[in-house]
Structure formats: C-alpha cells, structure tokens
Amino acid sequence: MRKTVSKFLFFLCVCCSFHVLNAQNSDINPVLISHFKNNSDKFLGYDAFGYSYQITNNVFSKIKEKEIFEYKNVSLGKITKADLQNPLKMVLFYEDFNSVVLLDNQLNKITEINFSQNQTPIVVSAIGMSTQNQLWIYNTLNQQIGLFDYLKNEYKTVSIPLTEPIKYYQTDFNTFYWIDKNNNWFSCDIFGKITSLGKIADFDKIEIINTAQYIFSKDSLLYFKGIGKSNPEVILEIKILEKTFDNFYYKDQILSIFTSTDISNYKIVTP
C-alpha cells in the first residue's frame, strides 16, 4: 500500500513539474479586438478616454471619432518625444532646441520651456512627466537625472552621475527607468535611489511594464519577459498576426501593433 501511494505521489509530482515547465515555455496568444487604417507618420497610443494620439508631418494630434485637436510649433523643429501619462497635461519634447511644451487636454499650450535659458545650464536628452508639477530630466552636461519644477522654474539633481550612456528610457510619475548601452536595466525614484533591475534581453524595441516585466521585439518577433522573484526568467513569444511591424504600445492589457498602414489592438494578459 505504501509503495502504491509513493508511486502515485511521485507520478503526481512529475506531472505537476511538467505542467509548470510547459506553462513557462508556452506562447502568449492575444485576442484581436479591433483593426484600423493608419494614416499617421507615428502613432503614439490611446488614453483612458478613448482618444488616440499621433504625429503626422510634425503635427501632434488627438482624435476621437469626429473630434480632432492639433498642435504645431514650427519654430522648435521636430517632435522628439511625447509624454501622454497625464492626458490633462501632456509633454512634447523638442530635443534639437532643448525645449519642451506642455499642453492641456485640448492641445492648447500651457507653457513652453527653453532649458538653454535656465539659470542653471541644462542640456536635456531625456524627459518625462513626474509628480508635483515636476519633469524628469536627464542632463547630459553632468550625466545626472534631475527634477525640474516647471511652475517655480527650479531644477535639482537627484542622482549620482551615470557611468554608461542611456540606450533607452521610460518614465512614470515616480520612477525614471533606463537601459544602458550594455543592456543593464536600472530605476531611479524621486529621492534619487537607484536600483539595478537586471539584464535586459537584446532588443530592437522595448516597453517596460513594471520593475519585473517588459515586452520587446527582436527581428520582427514580439516577446514578453518576466524577471525577479515572481517571474524568474520567463520568456514567451507573443503570437500576433503581423509578420512585420513598425512599433507597438502596451497599456492596461491592450497591446497595439502599428504598421505603416494599419493599427491592430489585441487583448493580452501577461503572466
């Protein structure tokens, strides 16, 4: 009887182990929920209110059905980056002119900041919206991350100098994430605490979900990777219909795939 129970328990353990291993190495099969034609030069994504954002001929636009809002600033050159975290206060970065423009929800200009005219010299190569009327800044003059209060026109450095160039960066209100040229992944909080988050897989494009998960593309294939205690080195291919694509965007379990002619939105649940 004991031998029979032992064999059964051993068999059960083997089956469970195989199931876990198989689950960790299975693909992610998202569900296509919508498909649209894309006429923009660069599609940026959506907000919680259903508006889409794009750039066409260097004009930043916000569209929902027949509602269209546009913003254009010829004097500042090409839009380098748009931060859409707060749809009531968006940030357009014009790196060639070391400037940013803050826009309201109807794309009216709230303020324009030229960092070259700041009392403390700043040369910006990375920027994003932070908390309490502040912007994340990476200042290439001292290679440090800082915060700029756009109401008080005050700048403060929060991090130590970075030792390697930034390959990719992404921000949320409380955190500045970056990947250096050696694919090392770090975060910096608003108090200047820097945390090493591990090594990133080689990528063509990437989007950080949180401190333990990210989605990346390589050679026209799309992958999810989880690292850390909850997801130790799990890497799964995301099986989308598109054979090639220009970019992708992920937010609130919606994965948007952008090609030069189309936009596909998938429902996806990451592990």
Image (tube, rainbow, N blue to C red):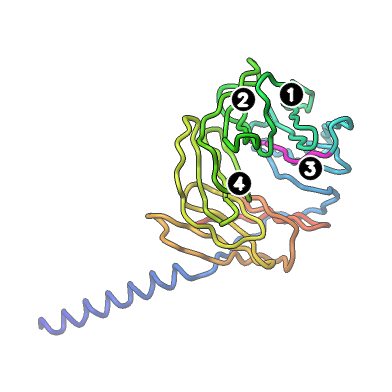
Indicate which disc, 4 or 2, sits on the residue closer to the N terminus: 2
Distance from the alpha carbon under mark 4 to that under mark 3: 16 Å
In this figure, what is the number of numbered marks?
4
Q: Which residue is mark 3?
A: 54
Q: In terms of depth relative to the viewer, which is nearer, 29 or 178?
A: 178
Indicate which disc, 1 or 2, sits on the residue closer to the N terminus: 1
- At mark 1, the secondary structure is strand
- At mark 2, the secondary structure is strand
Distance from the alpha carbon under mark 4 to that under mark 1: 29 Å
- Residue under the point 70% across and 56% down: 257
Indicate which disc, 3 or 1, sits on the residue closer to the N terminus: 3
Percent from the top left, x then y, of residue 152?
63, 15
Q: Which residue is mark 1?
A: 113
- At mark 4, the secondary structure is strand
Q: Mark 3 and 1 residues: CB-CB less than 8 Å, in contact?
A: no
Q: Which residue is mark 2?
A: 148
Indicate which disc, 4 or 1, sits on the residue closer to the N terminus: 1
Q: Which residue is mark 4?
A: 251
Q: Mark 4 and 3 residues: CB-CB less than 8 Å, in contact?
A: no
Indicate which disc, 3 or 2, sits on the residue closer to the N terminus: 3
The residue segment tinted magenta is 78-85
Distance from the alpha carbon under mark 3 to that under mark 2: 26 Å
